[in-house]
Image: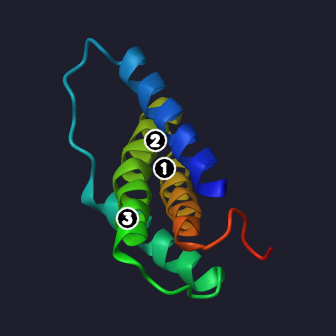
C-alpha cells in the first residue's frame, strides 16, 4: 500500500511538471537523483527488515524507486526551485518503493 501511494504521488508530480512546462524542451534527469533513489531503496530495504529478494519484486521496486523517484525529484526541484525538495523526494520515494519487497501489504504487520 505504501509503494502504491508513493508511485501514484510520483506520477502525479511528473504529470504536473510536464503540463506546466509543456512548451519547454525536456531536460534529462540528473544521475544524482537516480543514485539518491537507489540509496533510498537500499535504506528502505534495510529499514523494513531485509526481506528476501525475488527478481519480480526487485524489478518493480527498482523501477519505482529509481526511475519514478528520480523523475519525481526532478519535477519537484523544477516546480519548487529548491534543491533539498528534489533530494528529499528521491530518497523518500526510493524508501517507499522498497515496500514492494514485503510479503504483506503493510510493513510491521
Q: Are the two marked residues, 2 and 3, in contact with CB atoms closer than 8 angstroms?
A: no
- Outermost right residue: 109
* Mark 1, residue position: 86
* Mark 3, residue position: 62
At label 3, counting other C-alpha atoms closer than 10 Å, the crowd grade (few under 14, some 14-19, many 20 or more) is many
Nearest the eye: 86 or 91: 91
Q: Secondary structure at mark 2?
A: helix
Number of numbered tags placed on the structure image: 3
Nearest the eye: 50 or 39: 50
Nearest the eye: 49 or 69: 49
At label 2, counting other C-alpha atoms closer than 10 Å, the crowd grade (few under 14, some 14-19, many 20 or more) is some
Sequence-first disc among 2 and 1: 2
Q: Residue at x 35, y 57 (%)?
A: 63
* Mark 2, residue position: 77
CA–CA distance between discs 1 and 3?
A: 18 Å
Of the 4 image quadrants, the one containing the N terminus is: bottom right
Q: Are the two marked residues, 2 and 1, in contact with CB atoms closer than 8 angstroms?
A: yes
Sequence-first disc among 2 and 3: 3
Q: Residue at x 49, y 57 (%)?
A: 87
Location of residue 33 with respect to 35 vertically, above or below: above
Amino acid at each position: 500500500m505504501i509503494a502504491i501511494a508513493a508511485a501514484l504521488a510520483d506520477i502525479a508530480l511528473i504529470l504536473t511538471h510536464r503540463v506546466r512546462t509543456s512548451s519547454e524542451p525536456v531536460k534529462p534527469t540528473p544521475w544524482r537523483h537516480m543514485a539518491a533513489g537507489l540509496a533510498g531503496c537500499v535504506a528502505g530495504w534495510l529499514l523494513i527488515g531485509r526481506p528476501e529478494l525475488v527478481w519480480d519484486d526487485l524489478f518493480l521496486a527498482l523501477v519505482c524507486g529509481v526511475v519514478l523517484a528520480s523523475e519525481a525529484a526532478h519535477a519537484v526541484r523544477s516546480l519548487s526551485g529548491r534543491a533539498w525538495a528534489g533530494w528529499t523526494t528521491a530518497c523518500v520515494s526510493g524508501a517507499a518503493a522498497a515496500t514492494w519487497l514485503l510479503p504483506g501489504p503493510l510493513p510491521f504487520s
